[in-house]
Amino acid sequence: MLSISTLVISIFNFGYVLRAVGNTRIILAANLLRLLSTLILSWTGLHFYGLIGAATGVISSMIIGNIFIIIKVRSLVGLTIRNMFPFNELYLILAFSSLASAIMLLVKMYFPMDPLTTLVSTAAVFGLIYFISILKAGLVSKELRIIGAMLLHRPLRS
């Protein structure tokens, strides 16, 4: 559970937006908020629940800091939360990765192999199913167009 929340926190890092517009005071305030909440939540969590409590305190303080930054960025750019996050695409990616994981686990269960062969074959099955699913849904083409335009230093055409 902690690793999933850490992944979500690292995906939605809006501090870069604040750095890009030169508003680093908000980043400083968010980091101070994270520091104080880390000290309080980690110490409290460690006291009552041990290392799991301390780890949960750290993750919780990261979430608090990111929520603070998201609120500030939202007011800075004038967007709603729904417009800031591509929820439909994220749900599709979650569904496709879950499908690919389930098929990968079936391959692993029904075709017993040595560990190296299992690693290579399941990674290939997962990658192939995931990439085909994302490609068919049209999620790859948008990103590839943007990346290609950036690499070629050309303006992106609609």
Image: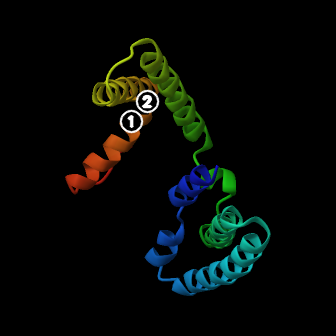
Q: Is residue 86 above or below residue 126?
A: below
Residue at 26% in and 46% down:
148
Residue at 48% in and 19% down:
103
Residue at 66% in and 66% down:
51
- For residue 154, say whether it is visible: no
Q: Is residue 125 above or below residue 150?
A: above
Percent position of residue 106, x then y: 48, 17
Residue at the far left: name it. 152
Say which of 87 and 62 sits in front: 62
Colour scheme employed for the rendering of this structure? rainbow
* Circle 2 residues within 10 Å: few <14, some 14–19, many ≥20: some
Percent position of residue 3, x then y: 57, 52
Amino acid marked by disc 1:
Val
Q: Is residue 141 above or below residue 12?
A: above
Callout 1 secondary element? helix
Say which of 35 and 43 sits in front: 43
* Alpha carbons under labels 2 and 1: distance apart: 6 Å
**Disc 1: which residue:** 140
Say which of 85 and 61 sits in front: 61
Amino acid marked by disc 2:
Ile
* Circle 1 residues within 10 Å: few <14, some 14–19, many ≥20: some
Q: In the rendered image, which quarter contains the C terminus?
A: top left
Which image quadrant is residue 128 in? top left
Q: Earlier in the sequence, mark 2 or mark 1?
A: 2
Percent position of residue 19, x then y: 46, 77
Which label was assigned to residue 106? none
**Disc 2: which residue:** 134
Residue at the far right: name it. 48
Horizontal relation, residue 141 to residue 52: left or right: left
- For residue 45, say whether it is visible: yes
Say which of 51 and 144 sits in front: 51
Residue at the far top: name it. 110
